[in-house]
Image: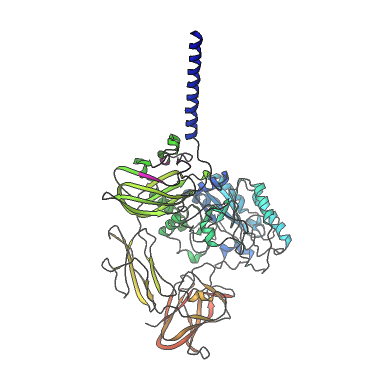
Amino acid sequence: MKMVHAAFIKINVLSFLLMLAGMYSCYQASDIPPRPYGALPSDEQLSWQKMEYYMLVHFGLGTFSDNEQQTPRLSAFNPVNVDCRQWAATAKAAGMKGIIIVAKSDDGFCLWPSNFSKYTVRESSWLNGRGDILKELSDACKEYDLKFGLYLSPIDNNHPTYGTAEYNQMFAGMLTEVTSNYGQIFEQSFNRMKEQNTHAKLQLYDWDLFLRIVMRNQPSAVIASDIGPGVRWSGSLQGIAGETNWSTLNVDGFGRGEADAPSLDTLSRGNRLGENWIPSESDVSIRPGWFYSPDTDDRIKSLDELMNIYYTSVGRNSNLLLNVAPDRSGRIPKNDSIRLMQFRRVIDEALGADIMEAAKVEASSVRGNSDRFIEQNMLDANYDSYWATDDTVTQATLDISFRRDKTFNRLLLQEYIPLGQRIERFSVEYMKDDQWKPLVSGTTIGYKRILRFHSVTSRQIRINIEKALASPVINKLSLFSAKESLSNPVISRDKAGKVSISCTTPDPIIYYTTDGSRPSNKSLEYNRSLLLPKGGHIRAIAMINQGKDKSKIVSERYDIAPVEWKVVSPTYEDMSAIVDGDENSFVSIYKNHTVSIDFSDELMLKGFTYTPSYDESASNIFRYNLYTSLDGRKWDKVIDNASFANMRTKPAKHRVTFGKTVKARYLKMMSLEAVKRGPKYSIAELGVITR
């Protein structure tokens, strides 16, 4: 009996141990994190992404020229009060995490005393040639706890060896200097090359050499270019990333520079199944142009413009690189600094108070039913805690509820990108009158996605993960009630005469008229584009909050649409841009060439319109002659040696009347003087007045 009893005890102990092992095994299985999916960020890329917002500084010879396409003499660089500590203090107070300085622009001027160039601060009058901007700024960044970065242009319009193999060694020497002598840098940026330099030489760059130097001297720096390898340009100089924005990119078969890089659309959107983790960076200047010019002192971006840039860069899974240009004394201008402080205040006010702190969240699926992956992880401040589903679940629902009504108009979501970018489509609903109503939808999330929408009040909101490449993993979910600022609507018309009215404010109601009368909430409500090929006078107003808040009334006068028009001369490839209805596109024409347009039919002209370009590189027409013709051979001068008022300081669309009616099929514009020196003048659009 004793032997049987002992055997019984052994069997029970063994069974108990097996049961414990099974329970432990189940626990372990439910507690295992999701496997990483696809391309993944390095530690350096993740640290870079968390910076979100930092400053770009253009300061050099271009600061002392009102034309960024022309470089003044070296003696012009003699700022009286370079204050890099003020730059750093401004960036810090603005909420920026670092500063990237353009150490050498395309003009070749080096902001440090390089041993590989004779076109540097050493050869200038500033501080009798003993100055070093990079040293002063890197020291200032350390003092203000900011990260320091460098932008170095491979293009060099001054170096005598440019266009030869020797230049690669010269540039490698410069790159070695800047990456060795100024402490740790967080980003080494190379600009998008266009090869439009004054040498008219083609330089074959040794990119393998350049990248090796950076990786050797600054192993923790991310390298930015069209194809990374650390960061890619977002494809826009307006600070706008793609609404769909994958942090992954395919680079095989592509190179750096305009001719070899992926398309602008690909740079904006990334590749859905990209093989390399190369997130996007969006750059834009706080005022027109990259370098300072007194002509732009009253053209600093508005808060509405800056907030829209923030939402379309940081809010679309891209870092924001905001250019701020010190003036000719060497300090950031007062008004620019004030605007930066206002910008930070508005960001903090909009995204400071997270109403999710009072919320309850229930997910349709929790990975292994484990507390390690529960919904509440999305509400804490720990970046490395997250909600996740089982591996087989790629669609899920998050139900959010409050004890009482909450008003909100911003949604912030973050994927836990150390495990990859996964979500490709989601939608949001809210409860109204006991029914789920659609609110907003989105595509990719990535590191951060912020969606704007009109204010709604509800106790319940639902987020539907509709499609994902792998099981969703979200580490942040926030809701905010931002103060709504109402932007003015924007009216545009294309070549065919299709009129569109847009507004950056989410979901406004837009009313319009086509006869020039004052719009109100009793006017036509805009919900789709309209055709006005023969022209009309459009006036529009936007409203929110049931009409309590109203925008300014905006107005556009349109005449005959250029649908049948052709540019006869000159015969450049892109000349059709001046009759495409798009005021954002422009062409530059050699000053000894005139522009002739064929209307394809005889028109009774009362005048014409000239739209200049707002691009910093453009040289708009100041003085001109204008001619008309019935056959394109015999020309009559209808305007002689006239000028466009304020074109140098405040370029804007000009409507010029003849004082009589002229029958014509052809129109010819002759530029007599442009606002900038140089071989070309610029036109965005030419139009007619017949009404």
Would residue 326 be seen by someone viewing this image from the given angle? no
Q: Hey, which residue is sitting farthest top in the picture?
A: 2
Q: Hey, which residue is sitting farthest right in the picture?
A: 166
Q: Does the segment drawn in magenta span residue 395?
A: yes
Magenta extent: 378-399
| Residue 20, x across and y down, in percent | 48, 24
Left or right: residue 422 versus residue 157 is left
| Residue 247, x across and y down, in percent | 53, 52
Q: Choose between 42 and 306: the one closer to the eye.
A: 42
Prevailing secondary structure class for the magenta stretch in the rendered image = loop
Residue at 27% over, 49% down:
434
Would residue 59 be seen by someone viewing this image from the given angle? yes
Callout count: 0
Q: Choose between 269 and 585: the one closer to the eye.
A: 269
User: Does 123 appear above or below 215?
Assistant: below
What's the colour scheme?
rainbow
Q: Choose between 76 and 588: the one closer to the eye.
A: 588
User: Does 631 appear above or below 359?
Assistant: below
Left or right: residue 537 versus residue 202 is left
Left or right: residue 661 versus residue 613 is left
Q: Choose between 20 and 672: the one closer to the eye.
A: 20
| Residue 241, x across and y down, in percent | 49, 57
Residue at 51% over, 14% down:
7
Q: Does the segment drawn in magenta span residue 691?
A: no
Quadrant placement of the C terminus: bottom left
| Residue 679, x across and y down, in percent | 59, 75
Left or right: residue 123 versus residue 526 is right
